[in-house]
Amino acid sequence: MNTKNNWEEKVSAYKVGDRLRCRVTSLLDYACKVEVEEGLEGFVHVSDMAWVSTNLKASDLVSVDDVIEVCVLEIKVSRQLLSLGIKQCATEPWDTFVSRYSEGDRMMARVISIRDYGCIIELNEGVEGIVHVSEMDWVNHNMHPSHVVSVGDLIEVNLLNIKEYRQRLFFGIKQCSVNPWETFAEKYQPKDTVLGAIQSITDFFIFISLENGLVGLLHPTDILKEEVLNNLKVGDNYEMTLLSIDAERERICLGIQ
């Protein structure tokens, strides 16, 4: 019997978009093979098994002898390849998510991976989002994300931005807690006296440690007494005058009278 002609004859009964019930016959790290009918085998790549793009193996999702529903994705007669998908049999969770949530909504999510620039989170709806490190803490913007979260953590996040054309979701952690910059701005007004400690001294600015971990800026020209300017030391405490505060830009300017 001509095996090629036999395969073509069997596969001619199917077309792209058909849904089938098949039995899983074998597993690879990146795919599984299924029996469509006797003498006709199909192939499901792991990327077509689940909408979530986490690095999963086929064995994380299916087992040998499972009977699964699949959708015909592609028929390559020249290679005798019948490509099938599992996730295409369900509504894409992205569509469900964006129909239910808006920017500013809070929800729970699980941390599934940590990168140098932030972390990847998974929502209950089966979609993934990104939390940039700058959106993790109100004060410490340059720390490594692993200092804030660990893989497996269940955290509360705020939906900051929906990029529909790229199917990207951006979240923040710090937005679920009190903003200390706003709290400081509500507590103090320009010309008020505040207590601060010299954190570091550079050629252009002196950085001041304030309450709740905030850091203010002191320009040398805003130190009126020359003896103070000449004797500044890291760790010294001073009473300072609040010159201005911009909570949105996270900027506090100080002076020493």
Image (cartoon, helix red, strand yellow):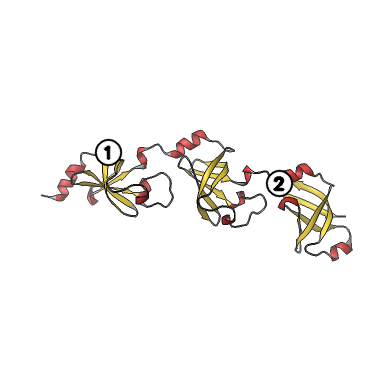
Along the line of sight, the residue nearer the viewer: 176 or 89: 176
The numbered mark at residue 180 is: 2
Residue 216 on image: x %, y %: 75, 54
Q: Residue at x 82, y 58 (%)?
A: 237
Image quadrant where residue 13 sits: top left
How many residues crowd around disc 2 within 10 Å: few (fewer than 14), some, or many (20 or more)?
Answer: some
Q: Residue at x 63, y 43 (%)?
A: 175
Earlier sequence position, callout 2 versus callout 1: 1
**In-image side of 182 versus 112 (left or right):** right
Q: Determine the residue located farthest toward the top in the rendered image.
A: 99
Q: Would you say the residues marked 2 and 1 are in contact, meaning their CB atoms lie under 8 Å apart?
A: no
Residue in the foreground of this view, choosing between 88 and 73: 88
The label shown at residue 20 is 1
The answer to whether 239 appears left or right of 74 in the picture is right
Q: Amino acid at mark 1?
A: Leu
Q: Nearer the viewer, residue 165 or 36?
A: 36
Res 240 seen here = yes
